[in-house]
Amino acid sequence: MKKLLLLLAILLSGSSFSQDGIILSQENANEKGITPIWPKCDKSRQEPANCFDSKLRRHILENFEYPEVAINEALSGTVTVEFIINKKGKVEVIEVTGAHRYLQREAIRIIRSIPKMEPGKWGNKPIAIAYTVPITFRPPQQ
């Protein structure tokens, strides 16, 4: 029972800027109909943003492994990972906060393993989109 995870809502507001240009928040990107296309979401009946959200949740659940040291020390808490899907469709972790560093490492590992995808596009130009994912870790019941 090492796989126990509660995924909270994906939240982020506002937009930010970087040297590469504009990075839209998920909220702003969704309002404008811009979203990265997760592999196989282009063939889905779901809207691209809904498909992205469901694939992200599934990815986290399927790749989650509660760290052994965290089990031994009964560590729990919520880790918040801020990341972008860049102009090339790859994940870049920006910031990780909350809980113990062992749990942070697992959250980073999961997010970094997100597959490369087609980036969001504003017109014909690829654009980076920022996401924030809170992941709650609760030790497995013995």
Image: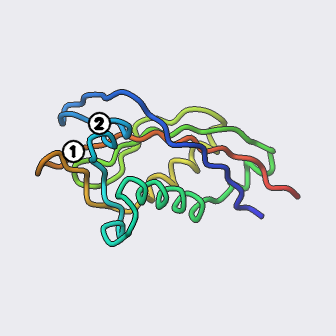
Sort mark 2 into few (<14), some (14-19) or many (20+) by Cα contacts within 10 Å.
many
Sequence order check: which comes first, mark 2 or mark 1? 2
Q: How is the image coloured?
A: rainbow
Q: Residue furthest left?
A: 124
- Report whether 35 appears left or right of 22: right
Q: Quadrant of the C terminus?
A: bottom right
Q: Is residue 51 above or below residue 104?
A: below
Q: Position of residue 74 (x, y in %)?
A: 81, 45
Q: State the image quarter where residue 47 is shown.
A: bottom left
- Report whether 103 appears left or right of 92: right
Query: Which amino acid, mark 1?
Result: Ile
- Report whether 36 appears left or right of 125: right
Query: Which amino acid, mark 2?
Result: Leu
For label 2, the SS is strand
Foreground residue among 25 and 114: 25
Figure disc tally = 2
Foreground residue among 69 and 13: 13
Q: Quadrant of the N terminus?
A: bottom right
Q: Position of residue 8 (x, y in %)?
A: 60, 44
Q: Which residue is mark 2?
A: 24
Q: Position of residue 105 (x, y in %)?
A: 56, 46
Sort mark 1 into few (<14), some (14-19) or many (20+) by Cα contacts within 10 Å.
many
Q: Which residue is mark 1?
A: 127
| Residue displayed at 44% across by 34% down | 12
